[in-house]
Image (cartoon, helix red, strand yellow):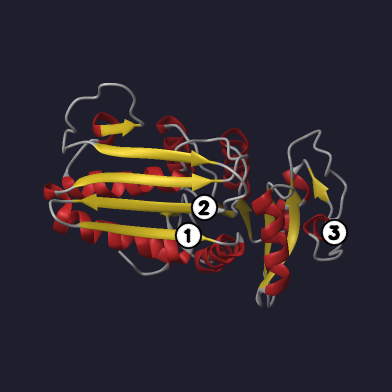
Amino acid sequence: MSGESMRVAISGAAGRMGRTLVAACAEREGVECAGALEHPGHDAIGVDAGVLAGSGAIGVEVTDDPERFLGAVDGVIDFSVPASTLALVERCRAAGRQIVIGTTGFSAAERALVARCAQDIAVLHAPNMSVGVNVCFRLIEIASRALGEDSDIEVIEMHHRNKIDAPSGTAVRMGEIVAETLGRDLSKCAVYGREGFTGVRDRETIGFETIRGGDAVGEHTVMFAGTGERIEITHRSASRFNFAHGALRASLWLQGREPGLYDMQDVLGLR
């Protein structure tokens, strides 16, 4: 189906990341935005996706029906909400199209559904598409192995005031990496905020602090607080374009892959 450029559709095209992805397609060689999706009733339906993104008309109108583009694209990039993503991944499965998922906030059952779809199509699901963040994931694993048993570990994140899930998917993944490396169960050892007389801190716990305010794109820190020293691994995003270009890189990498569930660590060769 593909010619010289990979043809992708952007789901959640009117959102912050969706608009950034459409604009990033215009900048990145080898990728063409050939579809744009939003939920039924959205004000952007029928609007040119390029105009919506502020990058100029591209002749692709936002639609609420994925069947209008699934037959003409190589894959889909989805940054929306869990319910929309789950419906879309099923449609991609039926159409035999790959999908890159950047949506966060899934339940365990919803993640399992994505994994089942990945038995039939190539799916890349990552809580954060930034190359820098994924390098941090690897550094957190190394630090956890070397320092984790002797440190109090806290995950601190900040995002803009309009983010609707907390902690962020990236923060949760950072906590998961720490827990997996140290052989802990995050569902049992996570502490989400503290108030009142909490008692002495249990070293086995992994703390999460969430900050929401302003227009912060995303900041994440994992702190390893030991006796006499503290190590902090921090990533700060100044623009959504780093996430968008990471997602496009992931989509290009996914082309021709066997069915399976992949993530950015696979794309970057960090496993």
**Residue at the spot x=53%, y=64% of the render?**
246
Q: Comparing marks 2 and 3, which lies closer to the viewer?
A: 2
Say if 63 sits above or below 76 in the image. Answer: above
**Residue at the spot x=29%, y=62% of the render?**
139
**Residue at the spot x=33%, y=67% of the render?**
270
Label 2 crowd bin: few (<14), some (14–19), many (20+), radius 10 Å: some
The secondary element bearing badge 1 is classed as strand
Instruction: Kindly check if marks 2 and 1 are in contact, taking CB atoms under 8 A apart as contact.
Output: yes
The picture places residue 36, in percent across and down from the top left corner, at: 75, 52
Give me the C-alpha separation between circle 1 and circle 3: 29 Å
Look at label 2 and name its amino acid: Gly
The picture places residue 145, in percent across and down from the top left corner, at: 16, 56
The residue identified by callout 3 is: 51
Q: Is residue 212 left or right of residue 174?
A: right
Look at label 3 and name its amino acid: Val
Give me the C-alpha separation between circle 2 and circle 1: 6 Å
Q: Comparing marks 1 and 3, which lies closer to the viewer?
A: 1
Q: For this rendering, which residue is in front, 24 or 85?
A: 24
The residue identified by callout 2 is: 218
The residue identified by callout 1 is: 236
Look at label 1 and name its amino acid: Arg
Which quadrant holds the C terminus?
Answer: bottom left
**Residue at the spot x=49%, y=46% of the render?**
158
Please report whichever mark, 2 or 3, sits nearer to the chain's N-terminal start: 3
Which quadrant holds the N terminus?
Answer: bottom right
Please report whichever mark, 1 or 3, sits nearer to the chain's N-terminal start: 3
Q: Is residue 252 left or right of residue 38?
A: left
